Image (cartoon, rainbow, N blue to C red):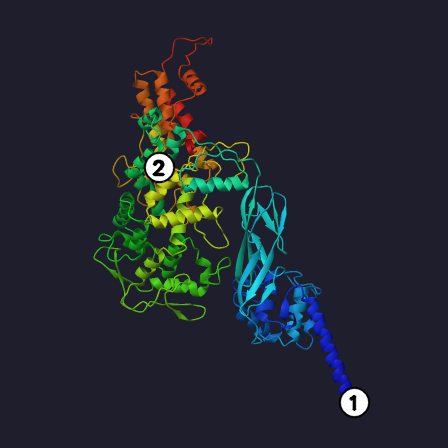
């Protein structure tokens, strides 16, 4: 017996050694160094396999409401302990068969041996299958007590320059708490931020297409993320660029040189005046302004007009119309007109006085009292739920979308549910007390310990600002004030960046980071050096909004022509030319009134009030024009609520609506005045072109207009009866024709 036992033990020892060698060979491509002989870790090994196979995606077993067929996994494996419970313990442990691991339902489903709605995810000959089988053989434990934790994941290379049609192989490296590293290229996930520019394969090969510019590929492994960025050059010679007026030009033109995309030339005076007046004041230049600007020979006249427009009340009106919808100044059943008007006036007056941006945000966040005494309080009247408050503040002022983190770890960011509820804790001590005014609340800080409950874990969390510790907050201190101080600190990586990115989009149509309110590590700017410089300048200026606007509009990058050259037609992200955009609903309505010499009446507002000065969303209901052309309804902090695309309904409205006809035919309008005026027809045509385009008509345009206006009446035989004097209807037709041109409808 002893001899037999010894022989059996030797054979068992030999088999174990052989098994270890097999495992070593199987995983030699997945591990390095001392890790080759380690036990399989559920967190470090099994979960990454499930993620790579797509098992814990939102469309599969991580789907909300129970996953698939009763098998629930956490999204992308962010909650491994919950996943372990689901795999090992749920269903009375039916998913694992320890005595014969290959018969485990967990493996037979994934390999397709048992019918599986998701298809074959782990073929029997795959590394992932063998790893999970080994994990079951070892006892399917959650932790061995020895495995290190993942610290970071890195991608090699971090940056690259890839020619169109070429490829770049990426390598993903995981770093652990014990100092070990692991090549996880085969287990990482890869996703391009612009699929039209580049595609990433499952094994980390990036292939770029034929669109030049900047593209990024997110590399995700076990909840950690790295980003590879690539420049895809067009390769055209860039021998001449406009002179640099400030650092914006320096970084924009340097980027274009790197990509080989020659910029368009600087636009002419008429185009610049119209463009900057629309972008700063939301209106066309008057005929007098256009004529005077064209006649001026001052070399600094462009800088001077920017200064003049920033001092104009129209600047405050227009930018208030940008902020009011984002801050949800919405009139509904519970809203009163006094509150809406007061809140709008506070925003407008703050912009006109150039109150520092950080001060405006602090006044909004820490608002207490009543609307009449302190108008920023109106925001808390519209946004009452602490969760909605934190989501709006984060998205609007930090460029961080926290909505996903309420239920699970953010799929593209580092934010967890704890981060979400720690941020909501800042708003947990807001008190409300009815006042003598119907529908009016007194907002105050309610004494007590600020905290919020993570509804999933049940833990009570103290205020924390996106992972930053803001210190202990006493029951007597309003936590919102501490949040305001953190947001506007110079070290905050989000606050200034979010604002300059939002304003850059206002002037250039495309933000440096798109969407403009989705700033994250996995969504890098197309020009990181420019973004950093803008952020630094904005902070050093004391968060001066007018200074930022001046810097942008006085740059040559902003003043480039919208006409493409032979190379930059396809450029959509590098600002090699000005990108035309359709006028906003309010601006277009005012422009039509300005050209036609008409006006639009708005309830409860003085005659002559412009559409860009409307205080809230209620006026959309009474204006078909504002509805059709997409004025936002103040229901969201996303600028996407404003419709900027064109539609058939818009074309039909401009062509044949009774509203437009009435504006053209008004008795005090431009057409009626022209019909009565004794000035020459040519002078009137010149005036129309200055009003519509800030320029005089070109010779061919003047000839076409005069031919139409002076076309004589004909007799029955088709012969001219007499020289014709243009009628009111003739001028209406000409105004209508100009109104429907792209040059009128777009800022270019």
Q: Quadrant of residue 650?
A: top left
Task: State the quadrant of the N terminus.
Answer: bottom right
Residue for point 65% across, 63% down = 116
How far apart are labels 2 and 1 at the CA level? 98 Å
For disc 2, the neighbor class at 10 Å (few under 14, some 14 to 19, many from 20) is: many
Residue for point 71% across, 72% down = 21
Residue 447 % position (x, y): 27, 67
Label 2: state its secondary structure: loop
Residue 726 % position (x, y): 36, 16
Q: 700 above or below 168?
A: above
**In this orientation, does residue 636 appear?**
no
Disc marking residue 282: 2
Q: Quadrant of residue 157?
A: bottom right
Residue 715 % position (x, y): 43, 9
Task: State the quadrant of the C terminus.
Answer: top left
385 vs 124, nearest the viewer: 124
Image position of 703 (left or right of 123)? left
Q: Are marks 2 and 1 in contact (CB under 8 Å)?
A: no
Q: 361 above or below 106?
A: above
For disc 1, the neighbor class at 10 Å (few under 14, some 14 to 19, many from 20) is: few
Q: Earlier in the sequence, mark 2 or mark 1?
A: 1
Q: 634 above or below 74?
A: above
Residue 228 % position (x, y): 55, 53
Image position of 214 (left or right of 315)? right
Callout in the foreground (2, 1): 1
Disc marking residue 312: none
Label 1: state its secondary structure: helix
- In the displayed orientation, state which residue is furthest to the bottom: 1
Residue for point 36% across, 17% down = 681
**Location of mark 1 (residue):** 3
């Amino acid at each position: 017996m002893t001899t037999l036992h010894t022989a059996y033990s030797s054979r068992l020892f030999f088999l174990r050694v052989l098994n270890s060698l097999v495992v070593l060979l199987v995983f030699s491509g997945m591990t390095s160094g001392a890790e080759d002989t380690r036990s399989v870790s559920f967190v470090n090994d099994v979960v990454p396999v499930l993620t790579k196979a797509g098992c814990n995606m939102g469309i599969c077993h991580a789907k909300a409401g129970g996953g698939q067929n009763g098998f629930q996994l956490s999204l992308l494996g962010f909650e491994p302990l919950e996943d372990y419970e689901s795999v090992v313990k749920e269903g009375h442990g039916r998913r694992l068969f320890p005595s014969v691991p290959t018969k485990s339902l967990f493996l037979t489903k994934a390999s397709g041996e048992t019918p599986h709605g998701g298809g074959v995810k782990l073929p029997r000959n795959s590394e992932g299958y063998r790893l999970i089988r080994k994990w079951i053989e070892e006892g399917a434990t959650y932790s061995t007590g020895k495995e290190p934790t993942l610290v970071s994941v890195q991608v090699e290379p971090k940056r690259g320059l890839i020619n169109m049609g070429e490829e770049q192989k990426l390598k993903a490296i995981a770093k652990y708490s014990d100092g070990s590293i692991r090549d996880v290229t085969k287990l990482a996930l890869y996703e391009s931020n612009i699929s039209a520019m580049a595609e990433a394969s499952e094994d980390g090969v990036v292939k770029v297409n034929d669109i030049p510019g900047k593209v990024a590929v997110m590399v995700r492994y076990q909840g950690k993320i790295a980003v590879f960025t690539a420049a895809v050059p067009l390769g055209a010679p860039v021998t001449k660029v406009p002179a640099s007026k400030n650092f914006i030009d320096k970084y924009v033109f340097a980027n274009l040189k790197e990509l080989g995309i020659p910029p368009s030339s600087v636009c002419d005076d008429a185009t610049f005046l119209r463009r900057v007046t629309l972008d700063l004041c939301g209106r066309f230049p008057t005929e007098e302004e256009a004529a005077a600007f064209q006649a001026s020979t001052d070399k600094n006249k462009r800088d001077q007009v920017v200064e003049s427009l920033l001092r104009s009340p129209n600047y405050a009106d227009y930018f208030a119309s940008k902020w009011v919808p984002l801050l949800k100044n919405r009139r509904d059943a519970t809203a009163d007109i006094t509150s809406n008007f007061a809140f709008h006036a506070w925003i407008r007056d703050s912009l006109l006085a150039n109150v520092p941006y950080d001060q405006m945000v602090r006044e909004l966040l820490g608002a207490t009292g009543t609307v009449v005494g302190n108008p920023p309080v109106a925001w808390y009247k519209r946004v009452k739920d602490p969760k909605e408050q934190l989501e709006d503040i984060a998205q609007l002022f930090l460029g961080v979308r926290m909505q996903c983190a309420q239920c699970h770890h953010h799929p593209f960011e580092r934010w967890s549910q704890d981060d979400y509820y720690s941020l909501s804790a800042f708003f947990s001590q807001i008190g409300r007390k009815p006042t003598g005014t119907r529908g009016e609340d007194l907002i105050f800080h309610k004494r007590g310990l600020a905290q919020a409950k993570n509804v999933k874990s049940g833990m009570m969390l103290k205020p924390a600002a996106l992972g930053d510790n803001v210190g202990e907050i006493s029951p007597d201190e309003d936590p919102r004030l501490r949040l305001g101080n953190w947001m506007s600190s110079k070290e905050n990586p989000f606050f200034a960046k979010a604002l300059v990115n939002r304003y850059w989009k206002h002037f250039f149509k495309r933000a440096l980071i798109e969407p403009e309110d989705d700033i994250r590590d996995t969504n890098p700017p197309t020009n990181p050096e420019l973004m950093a410089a803008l952020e630094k300048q904005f902070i050093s200026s004391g968060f001066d909004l007018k200074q930022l606007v001046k810097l942008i509009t006085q740059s040559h990058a902003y003043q480039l022509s919208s006409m493409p050259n032979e190379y930059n037609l396809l450029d959509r992200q590098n600002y090699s030319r000005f990108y035309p955009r359709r006028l906003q609903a309010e601006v277009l309505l005012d422009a039509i009134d300005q050209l036609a010499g008409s006006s639009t009446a708005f309830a409860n507002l003085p005659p002559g009030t412009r559409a860009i000065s409307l205080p809230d969303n209620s006026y959309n209901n009474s204006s078909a024009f504002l509805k059709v052309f997409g004025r936002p309804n103040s229901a969201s902090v996303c600028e996407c609520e404003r419709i900027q695309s064109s539609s058939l309904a818009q074309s039909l409205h401009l062509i044949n609506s009774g509203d437009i006809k009435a504006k053209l035919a008004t008795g005090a309008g431009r057409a009626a005045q022209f019909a009565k005026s004794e000035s020459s027809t040519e002078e009137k045509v010149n005036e129309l072109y200055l009003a519509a385009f800030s320029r005089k008509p070109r010779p061919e345009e003047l000839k076409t207009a005069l031919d139409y206006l002076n076309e004589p009446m004909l007799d029955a035989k088709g012969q001219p009866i007499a020289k014709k004097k243009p009628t009111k209807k003739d001028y209406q037709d000409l105004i209508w024709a100009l109104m429907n041109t792209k040059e009128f409808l777009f800022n270019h």
